[in-house]
Amino acid sequence: MTRTYPAYIGGRDVYGDNPRYVHTISARALLDDTFAALRLKRDLDEGRPGVSVPDGEVIAGACLVAGEDLAQQALEAAAAAAPAWRRVPLEERMRIGRRIIERLAEHGETLVELLVAEGQPRDMSEGMVFGVPHTTWSAQTLDWCAEQMAVTRGDDQREMLLRRVPDGVVCLNPPQNAATVNTLNGLTAMLAGNTLVVRAPRGVGLSCMYLLREIVAPVLEEAGAPPGTLNALCAPPLLDSWVASPLVNDIIYFGGSTKGIQFERDCVAAGKKPILELAGNDCCVVWHDADLDAAVDSLAQFFMNSGQICNVPNQVVLHPAIADEVIEKLVSVLKEIRPGYPEERGVVLTPVLGADWFYGCLGEALAKGAKLVHGGRRLETDGSVSDTGFFIEPTLVRIDGLTGARDLSVVRDETFFPLLPVIVPESGSTDEELFDQVLAFVEDNAYGLRNSLWSRSQATITRFLDSITNGGNLKINDSHGNFLPFLPNQGGTGLTGGVFGEASHPMLRTTHLQAVSIGRL
């Protein structure tokens, strides 16, 4: 069945004048016959008459492309609903949140199928959809956030309340590479009493609109939430209008660091709260006493989605004593990673559109002394080598020495392709001196999403925790990229989160502290 979604504004479907749609062509069709699939998409998007649609599940669905008028209606609906929604007791909002998770489980399989149609590998899609109730929306997470919403103290003269109150209208701009899972995370802002406007990216709007329209909206309607508590539309970028609007309080922004840091300045100048989820350029340190097999499993996470996600180890520092062994083990794992259709089990790689960027970074690294250990070739869907394949073979380069390593763009900057740099520090120092150098290297990273360490030594772990301040997440002898209950899975410092960056639970980040004292009568 082809699904079609208009905008959802003020508790109802809205089509606007002269509606036009953006169509989702299945990833399999795009991989099988790219030009024919893109031509079909163009003809459908432009509304050309007499378009012949081939048999099979080629078209997954379509979303209305909202214009400026509908975008303004969404803001007005959210602003109108805000006073009534924030007066709904926290306990009732949390009950609604639990029902959303129940409905997500009921509709999870369909959501997975839509994610796969958009090109997300099945294993990852299932992990995201069915993992959410145990991580971002787990009872541990939401109950802890709820506990932070109000703390009461008192004395003989007064009752004192330190509470968090909702900021108001929150606009959510999820990223193209992981729109649906990040929308789920951002939706927790609604539980704090904020009303939301969500802009689904046009390229992957279908799964996002399904989540909002078929899973979240019915729960809100059944619970009697004010119309306008949630508003969703698939639209071109709306950031400029959100920054300019007096109706907007917070904007949750995903994107690159250069534009994101400027966006932060624009928000502050306009009196908005920017909540930034920018680039990640994570570092993983594997020390000589590490569980090497477990560490290698964690390092291999970098190649999920061909390295085109943020919460993976983008650079690795290996103790010289175990470097060769770790590299050998990692190469063995990489040889088993293959491309394929997203619906196939075990597929990790996804198409890479930035092949020129990949080869530019690889060429620079090799020209400056890095050694190609594995990979570097383009692949077709069946794994065969090709000069024009959409996939890139998992690629590993070795860089000897910390000195000058950050001069290489593959180490200095976030990349979005399957090229992992492994840095082996200069030997000759004592382990204590060497670890100090490694700590300085990790701390000097301009980004700060996640950092991780593998070591069996409690003293080494303690020094790592005492020394590393950048990063919203630190992982010790644990999967670098996994999401956990209670701990925020987003947020960071430096170029990852901007000047206000920190580990981020949206439910708390979209509120502000208010102090209340009530004299006893």
Image (cartoon, rainbow, N blue to C red):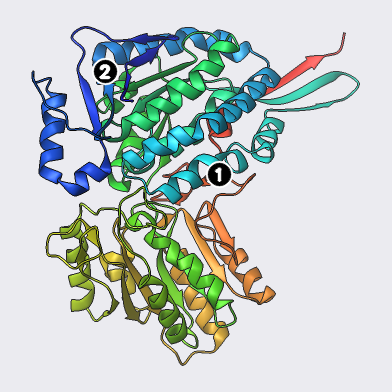
The three-letter amino acid code for the residue at tag 1 is Gly
Separation (CA) of disc 1 from disc 2? 31 Å
Q: Is residue 445 left or right of residue 165?
A: left
In the image, 327 versus 186, the foreground residue is: 327
Marks 1 and 2, the one that precedes in the sequence: 2
Q: Is residue 168 above or below residue 303?
A: above
Query: Could you tell me which residue is drawn at 61 percent across and 47 percent down?
Result: 487
- Under circle 1, the secondary element is helix
Residue 35 point in image, percent of width and height: 10, 43
Location of mark 2 (residue): 66
In the image, 99 versus 416, the foreground residue is: 99
**Neighbours of disc 2 within 10 Å: few (<14), some (14-19), many (20+):** many
- Under circle 2, the secondary element is loop
Hey, which quadrant is residue 323 in on the image? bottom left
Q: Is residue 446 above or below residue 250?
A: below
Tell me the tag on residue 415: none
Residue placed farthest to the right in the image? 156
Quick check: marks 1 and 2 in contact, CB under 8 Å?
A: no
Residue 151 point in image, percent of width and height: 75, 29
**Neighbours of disc 1 within 10 Å: few (<14), some (14-19), many (20+):** some
Location of mark 1 (residue): 131
Question: Can residue 439 be spotted in the picture?
Answer: no
In this view, the mark in front (1 or 2): 1
Residue placed farthest to the front in the image? 55
In the image, 10 versus 3, the foreground residue is: 3
Residue 20 point in image, percent of width and height: 19, 17
Q: Quadrant of the C terminus?
A: top right
Q: Is residue 477 left or right of residue 236?
A: right
Residue 129 point in image, percent of width and height: 50, 40
Q: Is residue 433 above or below residue 128?
A: below
The three-letter amino acid code for the residue at tag 2 is Ala
